[in-house]
Amino acid sequence: MTVRTRFAPSPTGFLHLGGARTALFAWAYARRFGGTFILRVEDTDLERSTPEAVEAILQGMEWLGLQHDEGPFYQMQRMDRYREVLAQMLDDGSAYYCYASPEEVEAMRERQRAAGEKPRYDGTWRPEPGKTLPPVPEGRKPVVRFRNPLDGDVSWDDAVKGAITISNRELDDLVIARPDGTPTYNFCVVVDDWDMRISHVIRGDDHVNNTPRQINILKALGATLPVYGHVPMILGSDGEKLSKRHGAVSVMDYPAQGYLPEAMLNYLARLGWSHGDEEIFSMEQFCAWFDLDHLSKSPAQFNPEKLAWLNNHYIRQADDARLERLARPRMESEGADFNNAPPLQAVVALMKERANTISELADAAMLFYRQPAPDAALLAQHVTEAVKPALAQYADRCKTVTWSREALSAMLKEVLATHKLKMPQLAMPLRLMLTGQLQTPSIDAVVELFGRDTVLARLDKFLA
Ligand code: GLU
């Protein structure tokens, strides 16, 4: 079978983490089997769909690198095709006009509810052999209903949830076109999945109730049924549906916060899917492993700490030139002064170990690119008369020492020994005088990066 999968977002907001995960699974499945991944924008809800949301989805997919092979197809551009299929179904009797007004349908439901029955369309306008239909009310525009089988079951072997069977008695004659002729959601999905020869429908399990209706329509069209796999929701760490309360839920908030796409992809891949104990893997590996058998039947929980941990891993792995490119604009907007300062690439190389995000990396790197303004009380506490002679000697030796981390480290140790001091007694005041803060990477690394002139100038200010 040729694998053809699709991601079919409705452009009504941003690209949600859950949507991105669905897209990732559909994409990886196509990649695994040398298939085709299709992007389809389900934009028929004119009130809620916006061009900005379409843009946000495309941007999110691009950031993640989930490239589609076909599309994007827009449902609004396929209206003629839906009308054509509607006409064909009206013609072959698998669909029919229903002239019941919304008020009549509502009254019907009320009666059924009052009688303790499940509300459903009562079939007034459904043609049957030998049945006489009511006279068409004048001037009323009909909806089109699908003629759902009355008996039997709809069954499918869900690739995630296992066998599912729904009795046709549970299913209404679904409205597939509105009085103005526009097709409804479930109908468009069916025609698209059919036309686009989708082999595997991988989607969120909020759609599982649509599946029996879609299968019945596909059958009526004589279409080959795709495999369906309904992926459970993503929940917040408190077990509630994932929402803003749990942190950012829009994929594009993550690059803004300084996450790398490979960290996000790796994280999403493990949300509801596993390959043994593997936690860290590339997309190449993921595409070689991904299958529907290892998708979890229970909802996954969003864990921001794990995402941050993965992001730290990928930041540490990342090329320094790339990290520089990502950090620099953030630092510019923080007023970083790159003149007479150490090369940013060397700074990010030093700082990346501890950064969970690019923003943290940029914030940490700022210590090399702003004038230090040490707190007077801290200066008094650390730059004491007792250590000043040692600091002066350190400054003096900085004039001639070979400017390498090793030589600087050896020199600092000699000064400590001469003055019988412990490392923090010199390292702390040096940090404070050079950077204005007490927490920095190793003092030798910081001194080396600042360079001789800056170090001498800064120490001089406090020791003169
Ligand atoms: N447009 C639907 C959504 O965004 C997805 C439909 C489908 O995958 O079948 O939830």
Image (cartoon, rainbow, N blue to C red):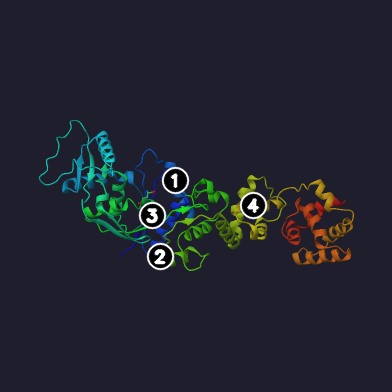
Q: Which secondary structure, mark 2?
A: loop
Amino acid of disc 1: Glu
Question: Disc 2 vs disc 1: which is toward the camera?
Answer: 2
| Earlier sequence position, callout 2 versus callout 4 | 2
Question: Disc 1 vs disc 3: which is toward the camera?
Answer: 3
| Earlier sequence position, callout 1 versus callout 4 | 1
Amino acid of disc 4: Ala
- Residue 391: % across, % down: 85, 57
What residue is at 88 percent from the left and 65 percent from the top? 418
Disc 3: which residue = 203
Residue 291, labelled with which disc? 2
Asked if labels 3 and 2 touch by Cβ distance under 8 angstroms, the answer is: no
- Residue 333: % across, % down: 63, 45
Amino acid of disc 2: Asp
Within 8 Å of ligand 1, the CB of disc 3? Answer: yes
The residue closer to the viewer here, 56 or 243, is 243
Q: Which secondary structure, mark 1?
A: helix
Label 2 Cα crowd, 10 Å radius (few <14 / some 14-19 / many 20+): some
